[in-house]
């Protein structure tokens, strides 16, 4: 699974770690994140991420 980086703030979404603070379990691929998921640091949507 690929890591994705936020183009706005540089946050890296690592699918192995997930985003447990926001209800995303470890092992969740970026493509499988809920539609409403936003960057935990700057709150932009998934469309502002690119593959790392």
Image: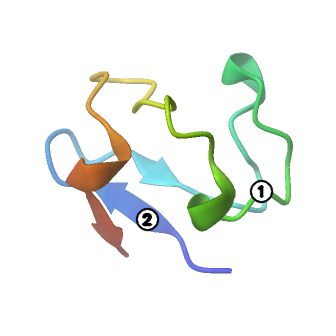
Which of these two is toward me, 46 or 40?
46
Quadrant, the N terminus: bottom right
Spatial CA distance of label 2 from label 1 is 12 Å
Q: Position of residue 43 (x, y in %)?
A: 31, 22
Mark number displayed over residue 28: 1
Quadrant, the C terminus: bottom left
Give me the residue at 67% from left, 21% from top: 22
Give me the residue at 17% from left, 53% from top: 7
- Would you call the spot at circle 1 few (<14 residues within 10 Å), some (14-19), or many (20 or more)? some
User: Is 29 located above or below residue 52 in the figure?
Assistant: above
- Would you call the spot at circle 2 few (<14 residues within 10 Å), some (14-19), or many (20 or more)? many
Secondary structure beneath label 1: loop
Secondary structure beneath label 2: strand
Question: Along the horizontal axis of the image, is 52 left or right of 23?
Answer: left
Q: Position of residue 9 (x, y in %)?
A: 20, 39
User: Is 42 located above or below residue 52 in the figure?
Assistant: above
User: Is 28 located above or below residue 23 in the figure?
Assistant: below
Q: Are the residues tagged 2 and 1 within 8 Å (C-beta)? A: no
Which of these two is toward me, 3 or 38?
38
């Amino acid at each position: 699974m690929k890591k994705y980086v936020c183009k706005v703030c540089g946050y890296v979404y690592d699918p192995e770690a997930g985003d447990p603070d926001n209800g995303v379990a470890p092992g969740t691929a970026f493509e499988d994140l809920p539609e409403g998921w936003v960057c935990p640091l700057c709150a932009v949507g998934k469309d502002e991420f690119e593959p790392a």
